[in-house]
Image (tube, grey):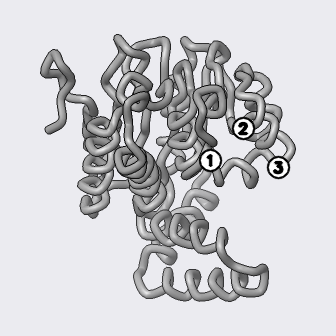
């Protein structure tokens, strides 16, 4: 396991068992340095999500940062400043691998954004399926101020916030507050810090109420939509709905809904 200089794990995974379902809480654990991620941290995060991908009972994962100040404040500049071109390729490749491990998880990933969300942190948040942030959070892509462009999963930003806002962030390196992050479409939900866990739990509960196989089919379908034309996406949706019918899950969930509708209200 990758650990920091104090021998603390760089990434902590806590698993909750809820009836026949697993909920994973993944925490980047470097609060003294605002949860910055060096190569070791990116490797640990990638390993954690690849391991979670093998859990057949997993229904949803939540990604957050340790402490109350920072989600993930970007890459480790102290490590990056001395990188050779070869070392830079390794570092940026691990940023991509960490992001891809979130996107490839077969169930939804919720970004619990509890503070600073900069650079690689914003890329990781963009790689999650849903994002909820606190009103005190800050967001930005400051790479150009450190002599490098924003790359890797920064390419996901235009489809979330539009080309204009993406250009503003990556060209200026300026920060935006949480209210603006919600207005431009990066955050689906914005809450006060003391309401964060309740709001995350609402999403978790809603996902757990869905069919476990349907959720996995939906996650795959959403990923497929990204690279498809409209006509291709429609056909992929038909195929996914047919695939869902290969088990009794739809029939059981529909019958349960009809039974509740028929039950007399107290």
- Which residue is found at the position 35% from the left and 33% from the top? 38
- Which residue is found at the position 26% from the left and 37% from the top? 40
Which residue was labeled with disc 1?
A: 154
Q: Secondary structure at mark 2?
A: helix
Residue 65 placed where, x, y %?
41, 25
Disc 2 and disc 1 in contact, CB within 8 angstroms: yes
Within the image, what quadrant is residue 233 found in? Answer: bottom right
Q: Secondary structure at mark 3?
A: helix
Which residue was labeled with disc 3?
A: 163
Q: Earlier in the sequence, mark 3 or mark 1?
A: 1
**Left or right of residue 250: residue 154:** right
> Marks 3 and 1, how far apart in space?
11 Å
Residue 217 placed where, x, y %?
50, 72
- Which residue is found at the position 51% from the left and 34% from the top? 121
Question: Which of label 2 and label 1 is nearer to you?
Answer: 2
Residue 90's tag is: none
Q: Is residue 90 above or below residue 223?
A: above
Q: Is disc 3 surrounded by few (<14), some (14 to 19) or many (20+) residues within 10 Å?
A: few
Disc 2 and disc 3 in contact, CB within 8 angstroms: no
Disc 3 and disc 1 in contact, CB within 8 angstroms: no
Residue 27 placed where, x, y %?
34, 31
Q: Earlier in the sequence, mark 2 or mark 1?
A: 1
Q: Secondary structure at mark 1?
A: helix
Q: Is residue 28 above or below residue 92?
A: above
**Left or right of residue 62: residue 55:** left
Residue 103 placed where, x, y %?
48, 57
> Marks 2 and 1, how far apart in space?
9 Å
Q: Is residue 262 above or below residue 201?
A: below
Which residue was labeled with disc 2?
A: 170
Task: Check the picture and name the quadrant holding the N terminus.
Answer: top left
Residue 129 visible, this angle: no
């Amino acid at each position: 396991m990758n650990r920091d200089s104090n021998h603390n794990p760089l990434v902590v995974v806590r698993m909750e068992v809820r009836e026949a379902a697993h909920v994973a809480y993944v925490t980047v654990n470097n609060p003294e340095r605002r949860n910055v991620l060096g190569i070791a941290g990116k490797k640990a995060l990638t390993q954690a999500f690849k391991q979670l991908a093998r859990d057949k009972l997993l229904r949803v994962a939540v990604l957050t940062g340790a402490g109350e100040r920072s989600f993930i404040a970007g890459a480790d500049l102290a490590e990056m400043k001395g990188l050779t071109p070869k070392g830079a390729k390794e570092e940026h490749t691990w940023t991509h691998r960490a992001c891809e491990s979130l996107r490839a998880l077969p169930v939804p990933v919720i970004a619990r954004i509890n503070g600073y969300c900069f650079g690689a942190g914003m890329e990781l948040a963009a790689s999650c399926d849903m994002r909820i942030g606190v009103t005190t959070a800050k967001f930005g892509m400051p790479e150009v101020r450190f002599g490098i462009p924003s790359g890797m999963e920064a390419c996901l930003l235009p489809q979330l916030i539009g080309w204009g806002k993406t250009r503003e962030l990556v060209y200026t390196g300026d920060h935006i507050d949480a209210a603006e992050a919600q207005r431009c479409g990066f955050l689906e939900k914005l809450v006060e810090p003391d309401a964060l866990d309740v709001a995350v739990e609402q999403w978790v509960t809603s996902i757990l109420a869905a069919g476990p196989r349907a959720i996995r089919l939906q996650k795959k379908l959403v990923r497929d939509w990204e690279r498809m034309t409209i006509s291709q996406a429609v056909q992929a949706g038909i195929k996914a709905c047919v695939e869902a019918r290969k088990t009794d899950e739809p029939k059981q969930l529909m019958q349960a809904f009809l039974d509740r509708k028929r039950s007399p209200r107290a």
